[in-house]
Image (cartoon, grey):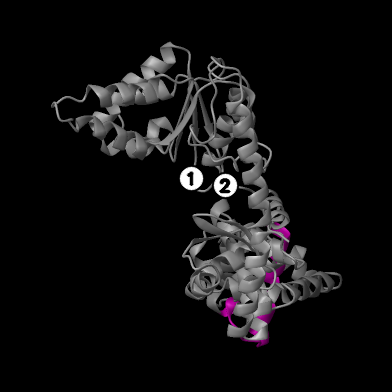
């Protein structure tokens, strides 16, 4: 038994006396001490543990750990797979540093890259397939294909992940010097040139700035749109761009808009951004959203089974971007952990995301349009369709509206149910079955549906 294990066993025995058995078993029983140096790195089983221990038990952990060791430590909670990734990264960096003398080398740390973002864990679908393919082509042949590469799209769609993937691939497979920065960092570094030293000069800072941004092989700059509020920094970036481009060095840029729509940037910059290849990343479609969720679940080491119904519901709730999608999954998992639910059901997922769904841009015009046309046809309101009223004059039009939503859109049962007052998927299925059976014998209903479809 090593020293860390002895310390942690003693720590756990003291913690157990301070908590209820339920609290101890839920939050501390499956934790382990990984290392104890300037900070205490504690391995925890789930992401919910990381958040809850840091927010609710930090003071208690500090106190008990101090009693055991006589020292105060900064606390860091990590998952097992995060430790494995860190060890792998450190091994790669060590191997790089052992390259023969005189041969330049690069590292993730020097390049400001996040080693967790790679092509291997970038989930590909129809909405981002072209962007991923061109990014990989640039990574394989930096400075030779698509220079500059300009990636644009709304926030949270994977632009930053792709840019880090390019950088990580180049670092891992070559000795090229890579630098990833945000436009904010570029502006901050440029403003630093105005600070004079004791001899009222800034030659040292100027040389350092040019060495950082021009003496490299690959420049990756994120969120270029924020350069729009810094005209002098734009001019410096113009000269930096020209120097790198003329030297056939690779430039990779991201933005939330295409170059033509960057209204606050100089025309000469926008022109240069269009010299290479412009690639748009679109919001993920339903299949890609479910693929992303399943991949995240696989990497969460989450013990509970999550059914396809729950995945389908989350995927249809958060359609705008990947960050909201992953955040919704984290919320559902945390909800089940905190309330000690043994199974993540559809009802639990709906309850967990209640109050957050309306913030997601998940409402489809197709469902809204169907609701309005059906309501107008039967001379009722859309609110009636969404209500709990069961009178036949409202219930039957509701069945028809739900049936048409299922027939004319790609939306799932849970998604349709959410748009009809938060009904569960079984209610939606029942409505569809009722209309399907009615159509077998009711020719008039068939005519009504055709009339409604024409109005749509």
Count neighbours of disc 1 (C-alpha within 10 A) and say few if under 14, some if 14 to 19, many if 20 or more. some
Across and down, in percent, residue 8 comes to 64, 67
61 left or right, relative to 295: left
Q: Residues within 10 Å of mark 2 (few under 14, many from 20)?
A: many
Residue located beneath label 1 in the image: 154
Q: Is residue 109 left or right of residue 385?
A: left
Pinpoint residue 206: horizontal percent, then vertical percent: 27, 23
Q: Position of residue 387 (x, y in %)?
A: 58, 81
Q: Nearer the viewer, residue 54 or 297?
A: 54
346 vs 190, nearest the viewer: 190
Against 396, residue 6 (above or below) is above
- The answer, for residue 263, to whether it is visible in the render is no
Q: Where on the picture, by quarter, is residue 181?
A: top left
Q: Residue at x 55, y 74 (%)?
A: 382
**What count of labels does the image hold?**
2
Q: Please name the residue that numbered disc 2 is placed on.
A: 283
Can residue 407 be spotted in the picture? yes
Q: Is residue 277 left or right of residue 392?
A: left
Q: Would you say 234 lies left or right of 348 here?
A: left
Q: Residue at x 65, y 58 (%)?
A: 315
The quarter of the image holding the C terminus is: bottom right
Marks 2 and 1 in Cβ contact (< 8 Å): yes
Q: Which residues are magenta?
A: 384-409
Q: CA distance from mark 2 to mark 1?
A: 8 Å
Tag 1's secondary structure? Answer: loop
């Amino acid at each position: 038994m090593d020293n860390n294990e002895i310390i942690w066993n003693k720590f756990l025995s003291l913690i157990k006396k301070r908590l209820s058995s339920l609290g101890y078993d839920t939050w501390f029983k499956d934790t382990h001490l990984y290392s104890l140096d300037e900070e205490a790195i504690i391995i925890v089983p789930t992401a919910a543990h990381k958040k809850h221990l840091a927010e609710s038990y930090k003071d208690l952990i500090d106190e008990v750990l101090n009693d055991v060791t006589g020292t105060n430590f900064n606390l860091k909670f990590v998952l097992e797979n995060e430790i494995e990734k860190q060890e792998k990264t450190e091994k790669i960096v060590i191997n790089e540093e052992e390259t023969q003398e005189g041969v330049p080398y690069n590292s993730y740390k020097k390049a400001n890259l996040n080693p967790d973002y790679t092509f291997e864990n970038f989930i590909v679908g129809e909405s981002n397939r072209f962007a991923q393919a061109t990014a990989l082509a640039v990574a394989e042949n930096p400075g030779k294909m698509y220079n500059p590469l300009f990636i644009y799209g709304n926030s949270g769609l994977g632009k930053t992940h792709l840019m880090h993937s390019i950088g990580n691939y180049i670092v891992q497979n070559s000795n090229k010097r890579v630098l990833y920065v945000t436009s904010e960092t570029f502006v901050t570094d440029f403003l630093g040139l105005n600070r004079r030293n004791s001899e009222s000069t800034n030659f040292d800072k100027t040389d350092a700035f040019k060495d950082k941004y021009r003496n490299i092989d690959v420049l990756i700059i994120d969120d270029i749109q924020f350069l729009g509020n810094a005209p002098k920094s734009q001019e410096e970036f113009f000269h930096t761009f020209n120097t790198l481009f003329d030297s056939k060095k690779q430039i990779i840029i991201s933005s939330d808009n295409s170059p033509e729509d960057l209204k606050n940037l100089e025309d000469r910059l926008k022109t240069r951004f269009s010299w290479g290849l412009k690639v748009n990343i679109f919001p993920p479609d339903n299949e890609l959203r479910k693929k992303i969720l399943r991949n995240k679940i696989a990497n969460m080491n989450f013990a509970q089974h999550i059914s396809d119904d729950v995945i389908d519901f989350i995927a249809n709730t958060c359609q705008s971007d990947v960050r909201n999608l992953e955040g919704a999954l984290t919320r559902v998992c945390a909800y089940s952990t905190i309330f000690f639910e043994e199974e993540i059901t559809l009802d639990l997922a709906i309850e967990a995301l209640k109050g957050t769904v309306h913030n997601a841009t998940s409402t489809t015009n197709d469902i809204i349009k169907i609701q309005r046309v059906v309501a107008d046809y039967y001379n009722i309101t859309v609110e009636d369709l969404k209500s709990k009223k069961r009178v036949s004059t409202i219930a039957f039009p509701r069945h028809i509206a739900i049936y048409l939503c299922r027939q004319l859109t790609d939306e799932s049962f849970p998604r349709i149910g959410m748009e009809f007052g938060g009904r569960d998927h079984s209610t939606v299925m029942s409505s569809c079955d009722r209309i399907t059976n009615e159509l077998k014998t009711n020719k008039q209903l068939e005519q009504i549906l055709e009339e409604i479809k024409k109005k749509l």
